[in-house]
Image (cartoon, grey):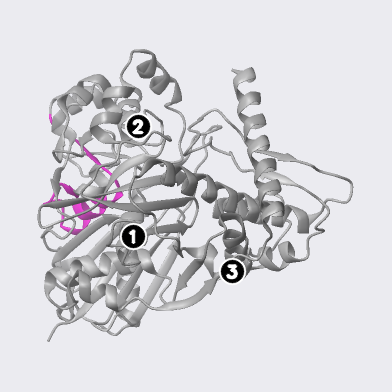
Amino acid sequence: MTSAILAIDQGTTSSRALAFAADLSILGMAQQEIAQHYPASGHVEHDPEEIWSTTLATARGAMQHAELGASDVAAIGITNQRETTILWDRRTGRPIHHALVWQDRRTAPLCRRLTEEGLEPTLAARTGLRLDPYFSASKIAWLLDNVDGARTAAEAGHIAFGTVDTWLLHKLTGGRVHATDATNAARTALLDIHTGTWDETLLEAFAIPRAVLPEVRDCNAEFGVTDPSLLGGAIAIRGIAGDQQAATMGQACFRPGMMKATYGTGCFALLNTGSDAVASGQKLLTTIAYQLDGRRTYALEGAIFIAGAAVQWLRDGLHLIASAAETGPLAADADPSQQVVFVPAFVGLGAPYWHPEARGALFGLTRATGARELARAVLDATAFQTRDLLEAMRADWRGAVEGVLRVDGGMVASDQVLQSLADALAAPVERPTVLETTALGAAWLAGSRAGVLPDMDGFADLWRLDRRFEPSLGEPDRAAAYRRWKRAVAAVIAFAEESE
């Protein structure tokens, strides 16, 4: 019986593919980094063709490593960096511009203008999001207005929009399918998350022709089959979800009140709120956690723009470390008497502050401050930002937030990171045995649809704990550290506002 599942995990810094067996063991894996392009301050771009070429190469590599042919793969699941925006010409299949990455802030002036015109309450009520450059809508508008001939071509029906999942689906199916899933559509700021349909009022506000948009399907829908020339035969694509929603499913956070946080380039925490689309009073996002067989489940989400990217900055920007793995041991040796606070607002502040013009800062430096103290400040910043999100979620939701945080992503391999997190939150933190939860969620969507993986309850029973981290910091020290963090954030915001 054909029982392997191929999961494509296209992220901000790399493209990866993993082949899973029916028992969820990993049969093969391949990964390639993708280039980051910074054409101006606050601008972040990717080459869509590189996204595609690395995705295809890693899919082939994972299958080769696992010694799988196309006939051995029951289905493909796709998970992807969300909000990143690509426009291509339907006639040629070629992108009209580099992709605008979710971190890109060039559309802040447009978002400010639309806010001043009073659009944000309508947008928030219908999409659950903020009027912020983070989301796809303003990025689509910028591309249509700044690429020669794009708007005219779009109005003639020649331009297609996609988040990364849609672009990959287009390429994998030989251009035959233009579709997305509900979780990625929910991140565009154009989808009414209560009806699951594109919103005409928002399309008009952003001046986006409806013809550019893909069809919205369930996360576990049939999305077509691959062009046989790509992977040695036609393989059904049976699952798509944005990376954070895929991780939520990979962590088996299926009960209302369960919460996970993923630590990659940024950090994204999702709280399952079931059928209740909670309107946040704390500047969190209301989003679709997953949509299965026509039924939507919602979540509150907090987005932190910079987490692992701050570790990359220590390595590539300051050259204080040679590898990310050095950060934890350095932080553990930091001088405890130094109270260095780092606010990593390189591309603005996300939830619960939402200040796109804020920029990063260090506080409390002395002549004795060195690499150890900076490493600790970077890890502490991730923990404090997570606490900001958790406290906002508790304030927003009338249901009971479970007292344990499930974590995943590249940073959680570090015990020091997770101990800092448990100390900041005053709550247990659980690391699963399978850290590839984003890819695992995509594999479960495709595999359950194909009938080779169990249903939701059966999949939840397979979740296994690697290690649980308990708080060890005393409450006075924890409270004092968090007060310093809040003062530092307030100072960064004040500086940004005075500079405008």
Please check the rendered image and state whether residue 176 is part of the magenta-colored stretch, yes or no: yes
Q: Nearer the viewer, mark 2 or mark 3?
A: 3
Q: Amino acid at mark 1?
A: Thr
Provide the secondary structure element on which disc 2 rests: helix
Provide the secondary structure element on which disc 3 rests: loop
Which of disc 2 and disc 1 is earlier in sequence? 2
Q: Residue at x 63, y 38 (%)?
A: 486
Query: Between marks 2 and 3, how big is the CA–CA gap?
Result: 35 Å
Percent coordinates x, y for residue 7 in the rendering:
28, 68
Percent coordinates x, y for residue 66 in the rendering:
31, 83
Can residue 463 be seen? yes
Q: Quadrant of residue 334?
A: bottom right
Question: Taking 59 as reference, is 100 above or below it?
Answer: above
Q: Amino acid at mark 2?
A: Lys
What residue does disc 3 label?
Answer: 414
**In this rendering, would 191 be left or right of 143?**
left
What residue does disc 1 label?
Answer: 248
Residue found at the very far top of the displayed protein: 117
Percent coordinates x, y for residue 400 in the rendering:
36, 54
Q: Residues within 10 Å of mark 2 (few under 14, many from 20)?
A: many
Q: Quadrant of residue 262?
A: bottom left
Q: Quadrant of the C terminus?
A: top right
Which of disc 3 and disc 2 is earlier in sequence? 2
Query: Between marks 1 and 2, how big is the CA–CA gap?
Result: 26 Å
What residue does disc 2 label?
Answer: 139
Q: Amino acid at mark 3?
A: Ser
Query: Between marks 1 and 3, how big is the CA–CA gap?
Result: 20 Å
Q: Residues within 10 Å of mark 3 (few under 14, many from 20)?
A: some
Q: Residue at x 28, y 34 (%)?
A: 189
**Label for residue 141?**
none
Which of disc 3 and disc 1 is earlier in sequence? 1
